[in-house]
Image (tube, grey):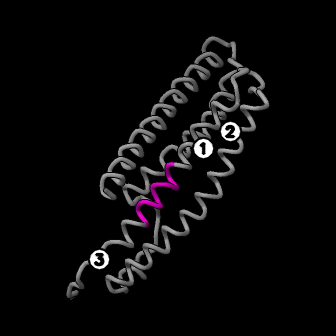
Amino acid sequence: MLANIERGMERLAVWLAALGALIIVVQTVWISYGVFMRYVVGKPDGTVTEATALLLFPAALLGLAFALKEDAYPKVSFLMDALNPRGRQLMTAVNLLLMIAVGVFFSIAGVEATVRAYESGTSSEILLWPRYLFWAPGALALVVFTLYAGVRLVSVCSSTPPPATLQK
């Protein structure tokens, strides 16, 4: 059952990362349009700066769970290399606990910001788009990341470490 949950979270991580990639494509096209309008046509578009700034928050966070899935976070590996398999497993668990602690904090902040933006009905200054639409994908990404880190922690703690191998 844990393996099924982990696979489901991994699929969700891929979908969220794809959404983030799509947002980056939209930003790229919109910025290119803005440059064209400013320098070729001579009539700058006033929405480009606000739109790309607002889309930056969800785009930055939507890849968190995918990076965890791919083990793509930067790390110092010399300590891990010096440990035995059980020590590596323990350090991996501590690392996941730290990720969960940070993830819970930012998940709460993101969800709270989304709810407050929705309840207040605030909108962006120029585009007049509801602000909660920009907070919601980031909050979702943070919650998914935190849950996935929790599933990975359970998986790491419930597995037996691989046997030690002889190193030359």
Quadrant hosting residue 119:
top right
User: For the residue marked with disc 2, what is the amino acid?
Assistant: Thr
Q: Are marks 3 and 1 in contact (CB under 8 Å)?
A: no
Q: State which tag comes first along the sequence, 2 or 1.
A: 2
Asked if disc 3 and disc 2 are in contact, CB closer than 8 Å, the reply is no
Question: Residues under labels 3 and 2: Cα distance?
Answer: 40 Å
Q: Which disc, if any, is residue 114?
A: 2
Mark-to-mark CA distance, 2 and 1: 7 Å
Number of numbered callouts drawn: 3
Q: Amino acid at mark 3?
A: Thr
Label 1: which secondary element: helix
Residue in the picture at 40% in, 38% down: 15
Mark 1: amino acid: Ala
Magenta stretch, residue numbers: 144-153
- The residue labelled by disc 1 is 139
If the image is split into quadrants, where does the C terminus sit?
bottom left
Residue at the image point whose x is 42% and y is 79% from the top: 90
The residue labelled by disc 3 is: 160
Where is residue 62? Give x, y as percent: 51, 43
Which is more N-terminal, label 1 or label 3? Answer: 1
- Rendering coords of residue 12 (x, y %): 40, 43
Are there few (<14), some (14-19), or many (20+) residues within 10 Å of tag 2? Answer: many
